[in-house]
């Protein structure tokens, strides 16, 4: 099982180099560089942000659907934390929507108390 965080892509490197080059423009370089950083988010950051927003929406939907869903219980659930962190690492290394959906389902199932061994099988399939 690969537990490493995704590495920067060539697009992330190109983003950093472009931002650095823009910062070298006399007089306006600093402002232009910051504007570039605000307007053009690195690809890995976009994936991370999308993943976190999807998970937040999913968990909020669970809270609205299931009366026994508790944020406090979820925050202290070590199994949920393990699954969430593992799924997040895999999701950031994937672009395929079907795989990301399966990982989101694994996180949600664990939040609802579904057997963690079934959830781990998802990780085997989608690494």
Image (cartoon, rainbow, N blue to C red):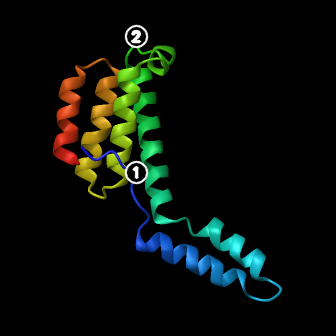
- Figure quadrant of the N terminus: top left
Front residue of 61/25: it is 25
Per the image, the residue denoted by label 2 is 68
Above or below, 38 against 69 in this view is: below
Front residue of 8/99: it is 8
User: How far apart, in angstroms, are the residues tagged by discs 2 and 1?
Assistant: 33 Å
At x 46%, y 29%, the residue is: 60
Depth check, mark 2 against mark 1: the one in front is 1
At x 57%, y 79%, the residue is: 17
Quadrant in which residue 81 is drawn: top left
In the image: residue 115, left or right of residue 9: left
Q: Give whichever of discs 2 and 1 has the lower sequence position.
A: 1
Q: Position of residue 69 (x, y in %)?
A: 41, 15
In the image: residue 87, left or right of residue 48: left
In the image: residue 81, left or right of residue 34: left
Whether residues under marks 2 and 1 lie with C-beta atoms below 8 angstroms apart, the answer is no
Say how many tags the image has. Answer: 2
Above or below, 51 against 115 in this view is: below
Q: Position of residue 46 (x, y in %)?
A: 48, 58
Per the image, the residue denoted by label 1 is 5
Q: Residue furthest top?
A: 68
Q: Position of residue 20 (x, y in %)?
A: 64, 78
At x 42%, y 38%, the residue is: 55
Quadrant in which residue 58 is drawn: top left
Q: Residues within 10 Å of mark 1 (few under 14, many from 20)?
A: few
Q: Secondary structure at mark 2?
A: loop
Above or below, 12 against 97 in this view is: below
Q: Residues within 10 Å of mark 2 (few under 14, many from 20)?
A: few
Q: Secondary structure at mark 1?
A: loop
At x 23%, y 50%, the residue is: 98
* Residue 111, label in figure: none
């Amino acid at each position: 099982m690969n537990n490493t965080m995704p590495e920067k892509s060539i697009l992330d490197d190109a983003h950093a180099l472009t931002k650095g080059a823009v910062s070298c423009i006399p007089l306006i370089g600093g402002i232009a560089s910051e504007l570039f950083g605000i307007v053009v988010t690195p690809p890995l950051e976009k994936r991370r942000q999308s993943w976190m927003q999807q998970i937040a929406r999913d968990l909020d939907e669970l809270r609205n659907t299931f009366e026994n869903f508790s944020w406090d219980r979820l925050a202290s659930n070590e199994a949920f934390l393990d699954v969430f962190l593992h799924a997040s690492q895999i999701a950031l290394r994937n672009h395929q929507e079907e795989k990301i959906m399966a990982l989101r389902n694994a996180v949600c199932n664990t939040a609802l108390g579904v057997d963690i061994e079934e959830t781990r099988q998802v990780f085997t399939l989608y690494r």
